[in-house]
Image (cartoon, rainbow, N blue to C red):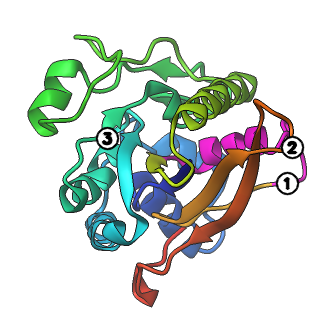
Amino acid sequence: MILYLIRHGQSANNLLAEQLKERSGTYTFETYMSQRVAEPPLTELGERQAKQLGAYGPQMAISRLYCSPMLRTMQTIKPLSESLGCDPTVWIDLHEHGGVFLRPGADVKAVGYPGLSRPEMSQRFPGYRLDGIGENGWWQGGEEDLASCHARAVRVTDELHRMAGEAGENEAIAAVSHGTFMDSLLKALIGRLPGKGLYFNHNNTGVTRVDFFPSRIEGNLTVNVRYTNRTDHLIDDQLTY
């Protein structure tokens, strides 16, 4: 099985971080956290990145699509879904580290939000398969810690191995997710969690390819990271972080 891991397009929070960094001396993580929004949409540039990804999609011969339940990934995968004629499945465990929350100050307890509800998703993204999405949203609690994010990455890794065991060797699937979770997932796939001192960076709509194929040990699979963070589908002024 071939897995394409794809980061979402530029979100409003991504743009906020870039703008703060451009204002000399104003950027700190705490400043960013105090101004970010819990459920950022794609920017206009993010939507163009998603369209470029969609146009590039048929070259990857993808047969199944997955995305996190966050608005920015559901928006990003839409042009890809349309170009492939394939409805995506929302996979809750692909969400970004932290969940849906606001934490306006360093010493302030995070406040969690439910995320998009099933009726909201159905209205905005008809045809998406909404596995496990509740009528009142999908996120519970405040801010997820990094250890819990790593645990999710292990769960997703186990499920990908199961899927690869049932799929054909050349069957390709794609999952649109988020920077920090994709880093955790890649580390889980290669057995490097928690992976301090190592980070897999992805630009907005950057594509990583991971192949699963039978190993010499019967019943086991070998994981081969073919490449990471390819942005061939973007033009220079569309490259963002």
Image quadrant containing the C terminus: bottom right
Camera-nearest label, 3 or 2: 2
Q: What amino acid does circle 1 point to? A: Leu
Which quadrant of the structure image shows residue 208?
bottom right
Q: Residue furthest bottom?
A: 236
- SS category of the residue bearing label 2: loop
- SS category of the residue bearing label 3: helix
Earlier along the polypeptide chain: callout 3 or callout 1? 3
Which x, y percent locates residue 124? 13, 38
> Would you place residue 115 above or below residue 34 in this image?
above
The structure residue drawn at horizontal position 59% and vertical position 51%, both measured from the top left corner, is 179
Q: Crowding at label 1, few (<14), some or many (≥20) Cα neighbours within 10 Å?
A: few
- SS category of the residue bearing label 1: loop
- Residue at the spot of label 1: 198
Which x, y percent locates residue 182? 62, 47
The segment highlighted magenta reads 177-198
Q: What amino acid does circle 2 point to? A: Gly
- Residue at the spot of label 3: 71
Please report contact status of discs 1 and 2: CB closer than 8 Å, yes or no. yes
Q: What amino acid does circle 3 point to? A: Leu
